[in-house]
Amino acid sequence: MAEWLRRRVGPSAMRLADAEGAQELIDSRDVVVIGFFRDLQDEDVATFLALAQDALDMTFGLTDQPKLFEKFHVTKDTVVLFKKFDEGRADFPVDEELGLDQGDLSRFLLTHSMHLVTEFNSQTSPKIFSARILNHLLLFVNQTLAEHQELLEGFGEAAPPFRGQVLFVVVDVGASNAHVLQYFGLKAEEAPALRLINMETTKKYAPAGGGPLTAAAVATFCHAVLSGQVKPYLLSQDVPPDWDRRPVKTLVGQNFEQVAFDETKNVFVKFYAPWCTHCKAMAAAWEALAEKYKDHEDIVIAELDATANELEAFPVHGFPTLKYFPAGPGRKVIEYKSTRDVETFSKFLDNGGELPAEEPTEEPMAPFPDTPANDSAEPKEEL
C-alpha cells in the first residue's frame, strides 16, 4: 500500500541525469526498467509513466540524456528491462508510427522479468499463474539426485527460443509439491518427467516414449505440441476389480463410457472430489439411494473421482456435480441441480430424470481447481 501511494503522490519513475545514477538504479534491484525517450513531453512518456504507476513489483527509471542513450547503446526511443539473470537485458523499441502501446509493453515486461526457467514454489507460483503465457512446460525432478540436477542445464538450453510462448518450470518432487504431481497424475518415483499444460484449455500433454530429456528432446516436444502434433492425455485411474460389487458403482475414466452410455440402463453419476465437504455431506444420502435401487436392474447409481479421472466430453467445474444418463439411444445427459437428499433423488429417478417445478434448486458447490494450488492439496471451497 505504501508503494502504491508513493507512486501516485510522487513520480512513478526516477529521472536519470547521468551514468552514475543510472548504474546505481540498475544495480539496486534484480529487475529495473528504464525508458529512453528523446522528448519527455511526448505522449509515449505519459503511457510509460501510467504503466509504472501500477507495476509495483518493478523499479522504473526515465531519461532523455543523449549520453545515456550512447552508454547503453540505444539509438531510438526504447524501453529497456535490465535484469541480473539470463540475457541481462531486453529491449522494447517504441513503434515510430503507432507509438507505445501500454498493453503490449506490460506483456513484454511481465514475460521478460521472469527467469527463462522458474522453480515452482509458494513464492513463485503467483507470478507463474499470472504470467499471461498460456503454455507451461513442467520438468519434474528430484533435486536431491545428481542425475536429475544434470537435466536442468539441457532444460534451460531449450528455453530461449520459446520465450513468450512457453513458460519453463521446474517442479521438485522432493519438496511440498504433491498437489502438482496429483494434478498431472504423476507419482514422485516417476521423475524425471516432462509435462506441458495449456492454462486456457487445461489440456495436458506428455512426450511419447521414454528417451533422455536432452535440450533437443525438450525443444522437439515443445514444437510438436505447439504445432498440434501431440494429442492431450486424460487422467484415469485403473478400473478397480470390485468396481461393481457395492450398491454405489465406482467409475473411472476407462470404464465411464461403457457404463454411462449403456442403452439398457438409467445411470445417475456423482462427480466428486475427495477433499470436498459438500461431497462428504451428501455421501450417506448417495449410499442410501444406491441401497434403495440396488434391485432395479435398469438403474445404476455411481460415482467418479473427478480429480483423478478426466472426461473430455464432460468437464467438471464444481463439486459435487450430478449427471443423469437416461437409457435409450443417443447420448442424452441431464444435470441434477436440486436438493441432495434421498427423497428428492428418488422423485427424480422415478420421474425419468425430471422434478416438479416447485422443487428447490441449486445447492452449494465447491469450485474445481483449474490450476494446482500453490500451498495446499485441498482447494478452498466457496459457497
Image (cartoon, rainbow, N blue to C red):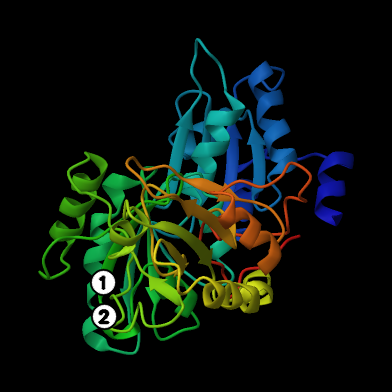
SS at mark 1 in the image? strand
Work out whether residue 127 or residue 310 is closer to the camera in this orientation and state it: 310
Rendered image: mark on residue 193: 1
Residue at 20% across / 45% down in the picture? 223
Instruction: Tell me residue 17's x, y (percent).
Output: 67, 38
Instruction: Tell me residue 115's x, y (percent).
Output: 44, 58
Is 379 above or below relative to 69? below
In the picture, which quadrant includes the N terminus? bottom right
Q: Residues within 10 Å of mark 1 (few under 14, many from 20)?
A: some
Work out whether residue 227 or residue 299 is closer to the camera in this orientation and state it: 299
What amino acid is at disc 2? Glu
Q: Is 203 on the left or on the right of 4, as rendered?
A: left
Work out whether residue 242 or residue 326 is closer to the camera in this orientation and state it: 326
Q: Is residue 15 visible?
A: no
Residue at 70% across / 65% down in the picture? 343
Q: Marks 1 and 2: in contact by CB < 8 Å?
A: yes
Residue at 51% across / 57% down in the picture? 128
Rendered image: mark on residue 287: none
What amino acid is at disc 1? Ala
Rendered image: mark on residue 190: 2
Q: Residues within 10 Å of mark 2 (few under 14, many from 20)?
A: few
Q: Is 191 on the left or on the right of 54, as rendered?
A: left
Q: Is 31 on the left or on the right of 281, as rendered?
A: left
Residue at 78% across / 51% down in the picture? 360
In the picture, which quadrant includes the C terminus? bottom right
Q: Is 331 on the left or on the right of 379, as rendered?
A: left
Work out whether residue 273 or residue 27 is closer to the camera in this orientation and state it: 273
SS at mark 2 in the image? helix
Is 95 above or below relative to 245? above
Instruction: Tell me residue 323's x, y (percent).
Output: 51, 54
